[in-house]
Each structure stands twice: as structure tokens, then as C-alpha cells.
Amino acid sequence: MGLAELFIIAVGLSMDAFAVSVCKGLSVQKLKPVHALACGGYFGGFQAWMPFVGYLLGSQFKTAIERLDHWVAFLLLGIIGWNMIRESREPEEEKLDASFGVRAMLPLAVATSIDALAVGVTFAFLKVDIFWAVAFIGSVTFVLSALGVKAGNVFGIRYKARAEFTGGLILVLMGIKILLEHLGLLVF
């Protein structure tokens, strides 16, 4: 997997965290740098940790399903992406408080990084350099989450649904690309 593909996956995975960061920024009256750092740290940290855990889990049963690995990657990325697209279309408004403490941020960080766990499983099948990948995904998520807090504080919630939709679409397209490459129908 090349740097461009990894960047696209990192951006796709970070869209949930970005959307929640926008909401957190919206909930703050007076934005401080520590708010952006908190969102970036929690979301970036968990987005880095979860693919690593998924990679370890995927490595355990990799040889058992190696012939189907491209289908597993396609299905996992497709399901994750479709769920993100579906959630972006729901009129549900998230209610977040202005707290950036552990009790508020930890559940949000876990919830927004569950998708990254499944992507980590696919990384085991694709023979990705996991240390580089998790550092890159964590860094991209850190930056986008920190920017999301500022964007939410300035622009409000109007971009949340677009971010979730875009992230979901990216993951679905990456799953299709992986499948087509392994079937020999796409050569890049």
C-alpha cells in the first residue's frame, strides 16, 4: 500500500473524529488551544492505537483466510463506509457538552475509532507496515480533529454530515479498489 492510499484511508477514518470535533468546537463559547489539543490527542491517539490492535488480531488468523483476504478487506471497508454514509444522512443531532475531560472524551475517542480497528484487520492481510501506518493515521487524525474544533467554533455544524459522507465514500471506494486489484481487474 502506497503513501497516497494510506493518506486516503487516514482521511477517511478521521472523518468521524473530525465531525465530533466540529460538534465539540460548537459547544465551546471561548475556544482555547488546549481544546484543539485535547481533541487531536484523544482522537489521534485512538485512531493510531485501534488499527494496531486490529492488525494484531488479523495477524492471528491471517493464514487461515489468506485466499479470501481481498474479500475481507472489501467487505470490512464497504460496511464501515456504508455505515458512515448512512449516518451522515440521518437527521439526528448530536448533543455534546463543552467538557474536554477524560469522562467526556474517552467514550467519544473509542466510538470514533472502532472503524479503525476493522481497518487494522485488513492491514494484516495487505502486508502493510503497521508502525508507519498507525503513526500516519494518528497524525492525520490529530491535525484534522484539531482543525475540526476550530471549524466547529467558527462555522458551526453545517459541515458535519458532509465530513461523514465523504469519509464513508472514501472507505467504500478503497474497498472496491482493493478487490479489483486482487481480482486483476485494476492495475495501478
Image: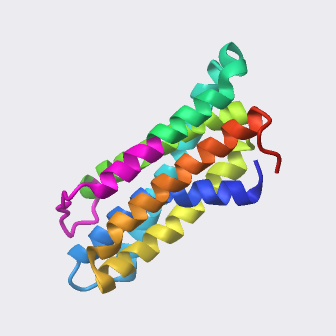
Say which residue appears at 51% left-offset and 44% top-offset. 116
Residue drawn 24% across and 53% down?
103
From what the image shows, is residue 119 above or below residue 164?
above
Residue 46 pos. (x, y %): 47, 50
Question: Where residue 184 sits in the image (x, y, percent)?
Answer: 80, 35
Query: What count of labels does the image hold?
Result: 0
Residue placed furthest toward the right = 187
Say if 1 sits above or below 153 in the image.
above
- Can residue 12 be seen at all in this image of the molecule? yes
**Between 90 and 55, which is closer to the camera in this rendering?**
90
Q: Residue at x 75, y 58 (%)?
A: 3
In the displayed structure, would residue 159 be above or below residue 140?
Answer: below
Counting from the top left corner in percent of width and height, residue 182 is at 75, 34
Visible residue check, residue 110: no
Q: In screen coordinates, is 102 left or right of 13? A: left
Residue at 77% x, 53% y is 2
The residue at the far top in this view is 64
Left or right: residue 91 compared with residue 134: left
Color encoding of the figure: rainbow
Q: Is 100 one of the magenta-colored residues?
A: yes
Q: Position of residue 148 (x, y in %)?
A: 40, 73
Residue 59 within the magenta-colored segment of the rendering: no
Question: What is the residue that sits farthest to the front in this orientation?
Answer: 185
Q: Is residue 168 left or right of residue 134?
A: left
Q: Which residues are magenta?
A: 80-102
